[in-house]
Image: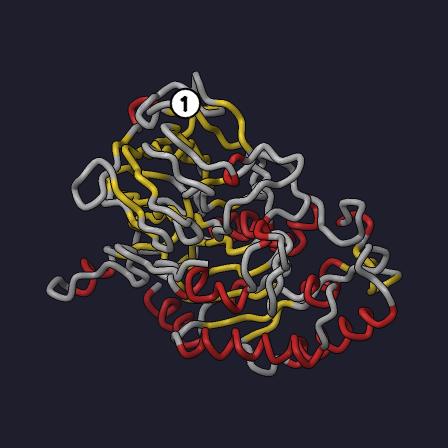
Amino acid sequence: MAATTTAQVTPVTTEHPATAPEEAHQRRWVASWAASPTAGCTIPESKCPAGDGLGDQTVRNPVFLSVGGTEVRIRLSNAFGSEAVQVGAASVALRASGANTVAESMRRLTFDGRPGATIPPGADVCSDPAPLTTEALTELLVSVHVVDTAGPVTNHPFTAQTNYLSQGDRALSVSGTGYAVIWCWMLLSGVDVLAPPHVRGTVVTLGDSITDTGMSSGDANRRWPDHLARRLNATGEPALSVANAGLSGNRLLQPREGRHQHGIAARARLERDVLAQPGVRTVIVLEGVNDIGYGASAADLIAGYREIAGRCHAAGLRVLGGTVLPFKGSALWDGRRRRIWEEVNAWLRAGDGFDGVIDFAAATAAEDDPLRLAPAYDCGDHLHPNDAGTRAIAEAVDLSLLTPPAERAREHRRA
């Protein structure tokens, strides 16, 4: 794997020291949407061409914004590419329906003032800001034309989202005509907005498939981080944007050998997928069931949680630990794994090392058996939550935990 760099990506707020405090505060970039990248590969029964590469094709990616703003920029990733990606053109627009854009919202994007960019292997690039007023909980279409053959393509393979691909350069096409359906986000790893004053930063949700998509309905934005964004926007309080750093099949400690679609381990991707997110303030960790299912010990998992929490604290972030959801009856369950799950969750509930604990397990467990997902929340495999389950996970988050008590007190005094 090529070493990841972050060329042109700024993981801190874009503020100007020479301006007055209030004016500087208004120049706050936050991650309104994110998807953790993985290496392109061929996945059986998937309409994702990332393993084959791209050449003179345009990717059109729909994204669900957690907060709105007055300007927008995109982040493109070639983190796992073996050759440079030649971007000929890129655009962002409000989504009308399918691959169709709202015509008057179409914005051509530039990179250091140029219409395209070369993304070296192992690198990310960020577009220049484009003026576009967006609202929270709305969808954008981000289009990227790849000039030369580039493959395999860095992508996010499991999306619960219909995405689009066309031949030729259709980045600035208002119409979705000519776009075919694909099942992955390719190249795009983040969309940032210049946020209004009440948005104080970003909360990043680090997890596996339960955070990535669960078994939520496609094209409905019902992942639990989406529901968390809805809750935050409904409060009327100083808000946080939400960046989803979930990856289906991901593990906290080790990668899945030969399964590139599940990404590198959470502790190995922490710097890129969490710490480098613009405006990041708080991290919620919900990982561990795949580690338990594939042989990790409780001691190893606890050491992994401590490492994640320590690195987040060293970066000045608030970090919350989430208990592992019950999974009795699933293909991963047996007596040994039950004991590890119980030991891990007991340690998590004790709160050692984290700034707070969210008891996702208790919030989703069956009333008559805390080892099982509640039937109303179970997609049927006894492991992944359905739409009601992802909502229950989001509702289990105590929003007051997302900001430090001293900061909440300051905000109440200002109000």
Given residues 411 and 55, the one toward you in this image is 55
Which color scheme does this rendered protein use?
secondary structure
Give the amino acid type for the residue marked by disc 1 in the picture: Gln
Q: Position of residue 48 (x, y in %)?
A: 55, 35
Look at 48% across and 45% down and name the residue there.
155
In the displayed structure image, the side of residue 225 where residue 72 appears, left or right: left
In the displayed structure image, the side of residue 363 where residue 60 appears, left or right: left
Given residues 408 and 221, the one toward you in this image is 221
Q: Position of residue 135 (x, y in %)?
A: 38, 40
The residue carrying pointer 1 sits among few (fewer than 14), some (14 to 19) or many (20 or more) residues within 10 Å by Cα, namely some
Q: Quadrant of residue 278?
A: bottom left
Q: Position of residue 136 (x, y in %)?
A: 42, 43
Look at 47% across and 43% down and name the residue there.
152
Q: Residue furthest top?
A: 177
Q: Is residue 201 visible?
A: no
Q: Position of residue 170 (x, y in %)?
A: 35, 24
Q: Is residue 40 above or below residue 6?
A: above
Q: Quadrant of residue 253?
A: bottom right
Q: Is residue 274 above or below residue 407?
A: above
Label 1 element class:
strand
Q: Is residue 312 above or below residue 151?
A: below
Q: Is residue 283 visible?
A: yes
Look at 18% across and 39% down and name the residue there.
114
Q: Quadrant of the C terminus?
A: bottom left
Q: Residue furthest left?
A: 18
Look at 64% across and 49% down and name the residue there.
391
In the displayed structure image, the side of residue 293 where residue 140 appears, left or right: left
- The residue wearing badge 1 is 167
Total labels drawn: 1
